[in-house]
Image: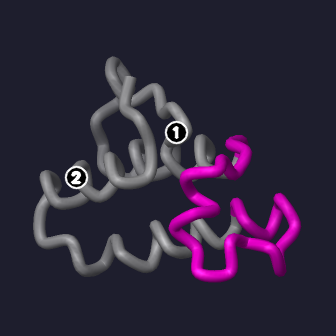
Amino acid sequence: MKPIAQLIGADSNVYNLIGIVVRSLAEAECDEERKEECPLRFQCLTERQRRCLLIKDFQSKIPACQSYGDVLNLMQEYVEVE
């Protein structure tokens, strides 16, 4: 299960939304589904390193987004939007 990000009702500035997603990822625990996606199943990492890895992965994909909608779609790959 993905972490929950409270985006609905938040200031819709894309940078604000990115910050909310990053905070949600930072506060979340790595679940079994995420471990299955990792080839090493995160065995080499501490819980904090797992969260940092997800955040870095999310942030590295933002520059490739061509529109506001692309960024929103990317966010939904990492968090459940509420």
Residue drawn 87% across the image and 67% down it:
46
Residue drawn 30% across the image and 43% down it:
13
Residue 38 vertical placement versus 18 (above, below)? below
Query: How many residues crowd mark 2 within 10 Å: few (<14), some (14–19), many (20+)?
Result: few
Name the residue beneath numbered marker 2: 73
User: Magenta stretch containing residue 34, yes or no?
Assistant: yes
Q: Amino acid at mark 2?
A: Asn
Coordinates of residue 24 in the picture (x, y in percent):
59, 41
Q: Residue furthest top?
A: 9
Coordinates of residue 22 in the picture (x, y in percent):
56, 52
Q: Amino acid at mark 1?
A: Met
Q: Is residue 65 left or right of residue 27?
A: left
Q: Nearer the viewer, residue 71 or 44?
A: 44
Q: Quadrant of the C terminus?
A: top left
Residue drawn 39% across the image and 43% down it:
17
Colour scheme? one colour
Q: Which labelled disc corresponds to residue 1?
A: 1
Q: Nearer the viewer, residue 19 or 31?
A: 31
User: Which of the two discs, 1 and 2, labels the residue nearer the N terminus?
Assistant: 1
Circle 2 sits in a helix, a strand or a loop, which is it?
helix
Give the image quarter of residue 53: bottom right
User: Magenta stretch containing residue 79, yes or no?
Assistant: no
Give the image quarter of residue 60: bottom left
Coordinates of residue 5 in the picture (x, y in percent):
48, 33
Coordinates of residue 2 in the picture (x, y in percent):
50, 42
Label count reads: 2
Range covered by the magenta-colored residues: 27-51
Residue 6 vertical placement versus 73 (above, below)? above
Query: How many residues crowd mark 1 within 10 Å: few (<14), some (14–19), many (20+)?
Result: few
